[in-house]
Amino acid sequence: MLASSATTLPEGLLWTYEVKWDGYRALAVKHGSRVQLLSRNQKDLTHDYPGVVAALKTIRSPDAVFDGEIVAVDESGRPSFQALQHRTTAGLTVVYYAFDLLSVGKESLLSQPLAARRQRLKLLTLGSSVLLSEPLPGSPERIEREIRRLGLEGVVAKRKDSTYITGQRSDAWVKVKFNRRQELVIGGLKPNSATLESILVGYYKNRRLYFVGKVRAGLTPHMRTELLSRLDALAISSCPFVNLPNSIGRGRWGEGITAQDMTALRWVKPSLTAEVSFVEWTRDGLLRHPVFVGIRDDKPAAEVRRE
């Protein structure tokens, strides 16, 4: 079940609020002593996170399916997606925050309201090493203020009476990001003599890919090498962005790409998703000061829209 995007938190007695954890969304399937972790696009993450698997094995129930987030946290509990992405987890702990329970044994809980599923989840994980993503206390204004103060990514608001709708985006779950970050599709790159200088990113609208900026900041030497290897395998001959070139004057890269600039670029099949932070959207629909955060193998490129 996916959340819809919004700019403000919904209010009312039926709404509850959780931290929007900065990690990998994953279903945890427990069958006896075996545990499998599956990403949103059905990628098997089981062997990547042995600590999470070990934590899930401490749950007493022999068979259950959980929904949650794999997160790398520091000593104060602050999440770091960059650490999780680059596997640089020294001084950090990789944990599983469970926020929903989809089935227990042969009993499906999908049609039960969220409040009931949460109650079962709390009882089931009691005494285990799995962490719970608990509802936050206080008014939406207070919650937003505290989440911003802590520097966390945002909040997910959920209706207490919402059933679990698999594979669909629902208005019963609403995500609000307090820093400007979103997933974008990589459609091209600018190479340099050794590796790549920057990547070109965009989003889909009516099945057409729109360019929104080139991203250079945040790309470490290791990530440039790794990205180039992955993008080389996706090379195509024509530009996948429908709005390039977008300048007829002298291209300055941050503001426009001319037809002459295009000759220095390489194009790739738009199937790889990156998460990018930025200061703001310009009036022309481009990103101002974008910074690369990481690759999102758990987010299908075809689903990327402007949030």
Image (cartoon, helix red, strand yellow):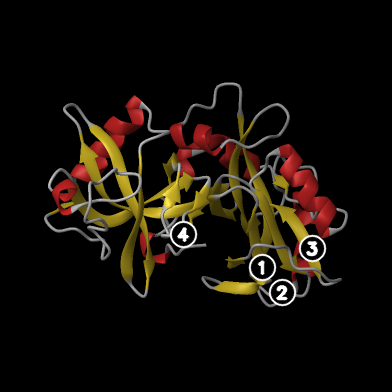
Residue count near mark 4 (Cα–Cα under 10 Å), binned few <14, some 14–19, many ≥20: few
Label 4 or label 2, whichever comes before in sequence order: 2
The amino acid at mark 1 is Trp
Helix, strand, or loop for circle 3?
Answer: strand
In terms of depth relative to the viewer, which is nearer, 241 or 282?
282
Q: Name the foreground residue: 215 vs 246.
A: 246
- 3D distance between C-alphas at marks 3 and 2: 11 Å
In the image, what residue occupies the spot 50% across and 45% down? Answer: 278
Kind of residue at disc 2: Ser
The answer to whether marks 1 and 3 mark residues whose Cβ atoms lie closer than 8 Å is no
Report the residue marked by disc 4. 283
Q: Is residue 116 visible?
A: yes
Q: Earlier in the sequence, mark 4 or mark 3?
A: 3
Cα separation between marks 1 and 3:
10 Å
Disc 2: which residue: 162
Question: Which numbered circle lies on residue 16?
Answer: 3
x and y percentages locating residue 139 in the rendered image: 86, 58
User: Which residue is the site of mark 1?
Assistant: 173
Relative to 269, does residue 193 appear above or below in the rendering?
above
Q: Are marks 1 and 2 in contact (CB under 8 Å)?
A: yes
Label number found at residue 158: none
